[in-house]
Amino acid sequence: MTPARLAQLTALRHDLHRIPEVSGTEEKTSRFITDFLKTQSPDHLFDGLGGHGVAAVYEGAGAGPCVLIRCELDGLPIEEDSQAAHRSTHAGRGHLCGHDGHMTMVAALAQDLAQKRPARGRVVLLFQPAEETGKGAAAVISDPRFAQIAPDYAFSLHNLPGLAVGQIALCSGPANCASRGMRIRLKGRTSHAAAPQDGISPAGAMATLLPGLVALGPGGDLGADFALVTLTHARLGEATFGIAPGEGEVWATLRTVTDRRIEQVIGAATALVEQTCGDQGLGFEISFDDVFAACTNHPEAVAILSAAAEAAGHPPEIRHMPQRWSEDFGQFGKSAKAAMFWLGSGVDQPQLHNPDYDFPDAAIPVGAGVFAKVIAETLNNTEAKNQ
């Protein structure tokens, strides 16, 4: 990649960084990407996929597999702490997970494909909405038009602070944990604070549930039995001295390596709520949000990524444990051979979701280069098998 082209892509990344939009509201970002892709002559362009998703399709000359490269459109509801000229212009929102960088690398692929189509098969460049809430991938896949671009292979990346800029890490097998946000609403009856016996307070149930939920997921090694329950929010009644509370809420995030294990933890947590509320004479309601399936790398897709990273001059570090955080890219692995790799964004880089995080522009050529080699390995290698 020439310095001039990197400067152009950096400017594009900065433009995206200025306009972060949270999950499900990515209208301006989607329009920006759509306008850019129109200049790169795709054979087909889909917009409004699963909400604000955009997909550009580049057809090869001959029959072959469909390769999807996916990035994310959404930012975070966090105020950015930055004095950079390209800092967020949207109050209370920031691209603090690097999705602006991910989009830029996939945009670079569109430039490449506009100049030279794959020898065979097709490439789908997917700019996916609502990754941060776990809703976007499922919404895109449920869109009736997705059947026209359903991939045989799906690839993505996520930048990783703590790893040197441009270093590639790759996991064989589980790559990202499954997780589920569990919201428990407790329903009793208020009374005067002078006569708490006349009501039904959730206080005792909450005192049982808080440590009880944590005990179901103590964390530890990231093996098949790993489970982590993190309490994220609790509320008891209203902020007043004169009323004994009649309702409350407990929020917890459940996290495991496998989808099977998270169903077990959900079952145990639900049983704990049922038993506790039954003992206390409380009603309850359980709901779930931020639902993420486990992300598991397919061995064939891992082999393709490993060869691509080698060919791009960035030999991958092979890891054997997943990241604790979740990624809805796992949805694509249910019907395609899918794999995600991690791209170093700096040893001293602030962590993801920190208010002072900013994607390093020096990583753009590395990620784009690995993806370009994936396409070459899969669609330009005449010895590869058709799907």
Image (cartoon, rainbow, N blue to C red):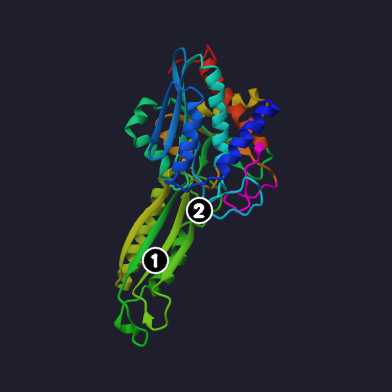
Specify the segment rendered in magenta.
Answer: 348-361
Residue 346 percent across, percent down from the top left: 68, 43
Queried whether the magenta region covers residue 152, the answer comes back as no
For residue 45, side relative to residue 164 (left or right): left
Residue 1 percent across, percent down from the top left: 66, 25
Of the two numbered discs 2 and 1 on the same chain, state the one appearing first in sequence: 2
> Crowding at label 1, few (<14), some or many (≥20) Cα neighbours within 10 Å?
some
* Residue wearing tag 2: 77
Q: Most prominent secondary structure in the magenta stretch?
A: loop
Q: Residue at x 44, y 48 (%)?
A: 133
For residue 287, side relative to residue 20 (left or right): left
Q: Quadrant of the C terminus?
A: top left
* In this view, 178 is above or below 79: above
Viewer-nearest residue: 255 or 216: 255
Q: CA distance from mark 2 to mark 1?
A: 22 Å
* Residue wearing tag 1: 249
> Crowding at label 2, few (<14), some or many (≥20) Cα neighbours within 10 Å?
some
